[in-house]
């Protein structure tokens, strides 16, 4: 089958493209670097010509509320319209576990808008909601979005909420199975086998990077602008469980 991966040059996209090619499929890794722009529409019709399946793993380049909403709404409209014209039979999208519980945050409202566009279109679909990628939560660059840094740089406040960060390999494996399967016209979840407290994960992150800052557990500390509880970032009763811790 011809499968188009939107965001095919990113962390998940590269792994997914490789997985699908190993299965013998014709795969287009679509991204601005390959001449496909889902915001302007440039190259979209050409990339989708003859495609049976589209997998959208693209993300907004900005997490600012307005910019993220504009990205997902514009990209969603353009992509779904192009798919309808091309006769795509299965739209697969990667979203975030907890989106519907975190709507105080602008980025999560933007992801919810993306999900609503998919559900209102007439193209058969499957949505994969994943927990946070372990590789991103393990990056010191992500610290400011998952915890609250003090102005003097000496302390970090972090929520003790439960998280189940999943390896990107497991997300790509789940997307591979979904893409070549039958559309469920619904949602599938994927998470890791292990539940952790976010504040403990932050402590591990700082220790691994030889950071001396003290982590203070604070139930009101915000994650991407939202206060958390133990259900905010964890899956439902029957998620797909990844193989990697």
Image (tube, rainbow, N blue to C red):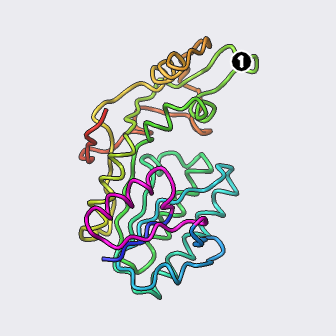
**Can you give x and y, in whole percent of width and height, for residue 110 in the image?**
58, 57
| Left or right: residue 70 compared with residue 192 | right
- Give the vertical position of 144 relative to 44 (above or below): above
**Can you give x and y, in whole percent of width and height, for residue 11 in the image?**
48, 49
Q: Is residue 29 magenta?
A: yes
Q: Is residue 59 magenta?
A: no
**Can you give x and y, in whole percent of width and height, for residue 165 in the image?**
40, 36
Q: Which image quadrant is residue 212 in? A: top right
* Count of picture labels: 1
The N terminus - image quarter: bottom left
Residue at the farthest right position: 152
Residue tagged 1: 153
Name which residue lies at 46% across and 37% down: 135
Q: Which residues are magenta?
A: 7-33
In depth, the one of 15 and 152 nearer the eye is 15
- Give the vertical position of 19 relative to 46 (above or below): above
In depth, the one of 219 and 14 nearer the eye is 14
**Can you give x and y, in whole percent of width and height, for residue 39 in the image?**
63, 70
The C terminus - image quarter: top left
| Left or right: residue 129 compared with residue 67 | left
Name which residue lies at 56% across and 33% down: 146
Name which residue lies at 30% across and 30% down: 194
């Amino acid at each position: 089958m011809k499968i188009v991966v939107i965001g095919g040059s990113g962390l998940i996209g590269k792994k997914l493209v490789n997985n699908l090619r190993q299965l013998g499929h014709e795969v287009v890794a679509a991204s601005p670097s390959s001449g496909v722009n889902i915001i302007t529409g440039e190259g979209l019709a050409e990339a989708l010509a003859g495609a049976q399946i589209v997998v959208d793993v693209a993300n907004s380049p900005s997490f600012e509320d307005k910019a993220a909403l504009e990205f997902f709404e514009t990209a969603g409209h353009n992509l779904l319209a192009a798919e309808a014209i091309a006769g795509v039979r299965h739209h697969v999208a990667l979203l975030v576990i907890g989106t519907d519980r975190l709507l105080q945050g602008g980025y999560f409202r933007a992801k919810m808008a993306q999900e609503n566009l998919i559900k209102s279109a007439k193209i058969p679909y499957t949505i994969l909601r994943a927990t946070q990628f372990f590789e991103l939560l393990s990056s010191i660059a992500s610290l400011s979005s998952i915890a609250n840094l003090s102005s003097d740089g000496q302390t970090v406040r972090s929520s003790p909420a439960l998280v189940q960060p999943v390896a990107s390999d497991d997300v790509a494996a789940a997307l591979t199975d979904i893409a070549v399967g039958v559309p469920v016209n619904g949602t599938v979840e994927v998470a890791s086998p292990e539940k952790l407290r976010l504040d403990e994960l932050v402590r591990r992150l700082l220790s691994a990077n030889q950071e001396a800052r003290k982590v203070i557990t604070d139930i009101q500390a915000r994650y991407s602008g939202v206060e958390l509880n133990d259900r905010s970032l964890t899956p439902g009763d029957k998620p797909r469980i990844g193989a990697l811790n």
